[in-house]
Image (cartoon, rainbow, N blue to C red):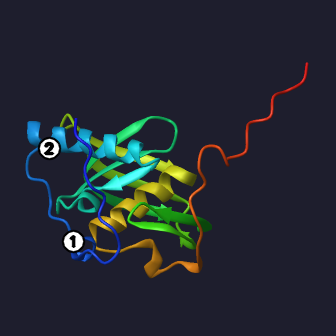
Amino acid sequence: MALRTVRTDGDPVLRKKAKKVEKIDGAIVSLLKDMADTMYANDGIGLAANQVGILKRLIVVDDGDGLLMLANPVILSCEGSCCREEGCLSVPETYGEVERPEKIVVRAFNEKGSRLEIEADDMLARIIQHEIDHLDGKLFIDTAKNTEKRPKKSPEEKPETQKEES
């Protein structure tokens, strides 16, 4: 697999609407794998195809429970509301609070071409909505409140997990 260049705010491709994927073939699967590799290499939890310059309705997400590769995702329903901080690989070192539905049902196709319906809540719902926004040419900063610039923490600066004493 190959790492792709992540496009950043100001690149016109990020403001364009992605086109429907007509057929999931080897080229699409290869692109999805490249996207996943790129997401992981950049410590991301989600990536949309237009973030790597491809205007196709493809996203990859991993909330810690495993990788999802989705084509043509559509939100069928949503409920609740939750405001949480978000960041984005395409808007480096910028963070802001975004209000989104807390639970969603999404229809999409996986990398094998199988149709799925995913019930997502909490972080997974947020990531999927964030990535679908990208497919529609929207960035989180368009609706975020209290945005601030701050450097991403290096692995050395992240707090260590405390061990339980026995």
Question: Which quadrant: the N terminus?
Answer: top left
Quarter of the view holding residue 74: bottom left
Q: Front-most of 5 and 135? A: 5
Q: What is the three-letter code of the residue carrying label 1?
A: Val
Dot 1, how many residues are within 10 Å of its Cα: few (below 14), some (14-19), or many (20+)?
A: some
Q: Are marks 1 and 2 in contact (CB under 8 Å)?
A: no
- Label 2 sits on a secondary structure element that is helix
Q: How much space separates mark 1 and mark 2, taking CA atoms?
A: 19 Å
Q: Position of residue 108 (x, y in %)?
A: 27, 49
Q: What is the three-letter code of the residue carrying label 2?
A: Ile
| Residue 70 appears left or right of 55 | right
Quarter of the view holding residue 163: top right
Q: Residue furthest right?
A: 166
Say if 153 sits above or below 88 in the image. Answer: above
The answer to whether one can see residue 3 in this image is yes
- Label 1 sits on a secondary structure element that is helix
The answer to whether one can see residue 79 in this image is no
Question: Which quadrant: the C terminus?
Answer: top right
Q: Position of residue 4 (x, y in %)?
A: 25, 50
To which residue does mark 1 refer? 13
Q: Nearer the viewer, mark 1 or mark 2?
A: 1
Q: Front-most of 30 and 76? A: 30
Residue at the image point whose x is 14% and y is 44% from the top: 28
Say if 1 sits above or below 75 in the image. Answer: above
Q: Which mark is residue 60?
A: none
To which residue does mark 2 refer? 28
Q: Position of residue 83 (x, y in %)?
A: 62, 69
Residue at the image point whose x is 48% and y is 49% from the top: 120
Residue at the image point whose x is 27% and y is 55% from the top: 5
